[in-house]
Amino acid sequence: SDQPVAILVPGRIHPRVLERLKEDFEIVAVPMGPPTDIDPGIRDRIRGVAISGVLDNGWIDRLPNLEIVSNFGVGYDGVDTAKALQHDIIVTHTPDVLNDEVADTTIALLLNTLREYPRAENYLREGRWKSEGPYPLTPLSLRGRHVGILGLGRIGIEIARRLEPFKVRIGYHTRTRRDGLPYTYYPSLKAMAEEVDTLISIVPGTAATHKIFTSEIFAALGPNGVFINVGRGTSVDEEALAEALRSRTIAAAGLDVFYDEPNVPQALLDLPNVSLLPHVASASVPTRNAMADLVVDNLIGWFREKKVITPVPETPVKA
Ligand code: NDP
């Protein structure tokens, strides 16, 4: 038919995605969450989804002609790829275009955690520099640290490269060892936590990474230990982390991601030795524009010439 392909957009998404989609497609905007009733005539024309966040599985059951889910973000834990695969639905994501931004943020969060820059700025703004004198010296420093990175993929390698000029020792753990790198490989997260004093997590949110940061890992990291998480909050037992910070089992933590966003546990908010960011690692205008373009270009590529740019490995594109 000459009716346009319709793209379902549950919940909010970057405005550039909608602006660009409008040029080629009909947009069907629905609330985030389980399927709502939509006219069968429109429903049957929905062949794509653009999603930022969690795609309710009910939509996959309800849309008989769905071919592709284009996910905003490199992490696609909000889309059930096993279910998509069963229905021959391709899932795409936005890798690489955000590597540098996320790695930059990781370094900033690490320094904020160690040197308390946000807290020091607040001290100045509150007039306390004038009334109380210099901001207290920070107990922690990056000097002489030994950093272990969990996940050395597209983003992890950029974090490692950025750490080199900071003159710290660098190691990593992944399930598959990478060749030809000047970094120490550790065979497990536990083994790495025992050897390093600074842990950076940049792994995806999967069943295998669910709550792997336990009280046992924090105990292994030790009292000079610093934990930085820019991967996924689901990797962390947040109660164990708050307790490790409270009891000084570890020294400090810096978090950009949380188990149940945007809910940040009060126990973490109440602690002085944690630096918190609201999931902003990739959140600059230029980087989010590049991610928005990739979301749209995957859909355009698919519907114009059956080619996607960045499919996820779980849903290979059949020729
Ligand atoms: P990649 O797939 O390129 O890298 C993932 C790395 O994690 C690989 O080195 C992989 O190695 C390792 N890994 C995966 N599972 C495990 C495991 N169970 N144990 C140990 N290592 C594991 O992904 P990216 O670098 O592009 O992105 C990583 C994640 O960062 C995203 O999935 C997303 O969740 C998160 N992210 C967060 C952002 C934020 O705003 N805070 C922004 C961007 C990304 P191997 O398979 O050999 O184990």
Image: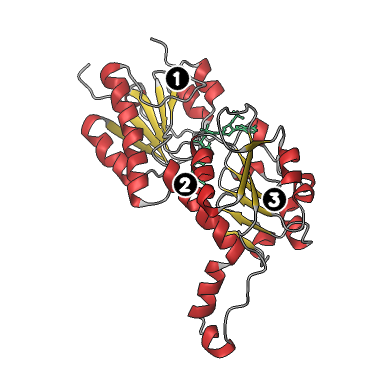
Q: Are marks 1 and 2 in contact (CB under 8 Å)?
A: no
Is residue 277 something that shows in the picture?
Answer: no
Q: Are marks 3 and 2 in contact (CB under 8 Å)?
A: no
- Name the residue at 48% across, 47% down: 103
Please name the amino acid that badge 1 sits on: Ile
- The colour scheme used to paint the residues is secondary structure
- In this view, the residue farthest toward the bottom is 131
Place of residue 116 in the rendered image (x, y in percent of width and height, measured from the top left): 58, 67
Q: Secondary structure at mark 2?
A: helix
From this view, report whether residue 216 is shown above or below residue 188.
below
User: In this view of the protein, which residue sits in the foreground, 238 or 123?
Assistant: 123
Q: Secondary structure at mark 3?
A: helix
Comes first in the chain, label 3 or label 2: 2
From this view, report whether residue 251 is shown above or below residue 317.
below
Q: Which residue is mark 3?
A: 238
Comes first in the chain, label 1 or label 2: 1
- Name the residue at 27% across, 17% down: 305
Q: Which residue is mark 2?
A: 102
Going by the image, does 197 lie left or right of 27? right
From this view, report whether residue 291 is shown above or below residue 318.
below
Is residue 141 something that shows in the picture?
Answer: yes
User: In this view of the protein, which residue sits in the foreground, 270 or 5?
Assistant: 270
Q: Which residue is mark 1?
A: 89
- In this view, the residue farthest toward the top is 319
From this view, report whether residue 173 is shown above or below residue 317.
below
Please name the amino acid that badge 3 sits on: Glu
Q: Is mark 2 within 8 Å of ligand 1?
A: yes
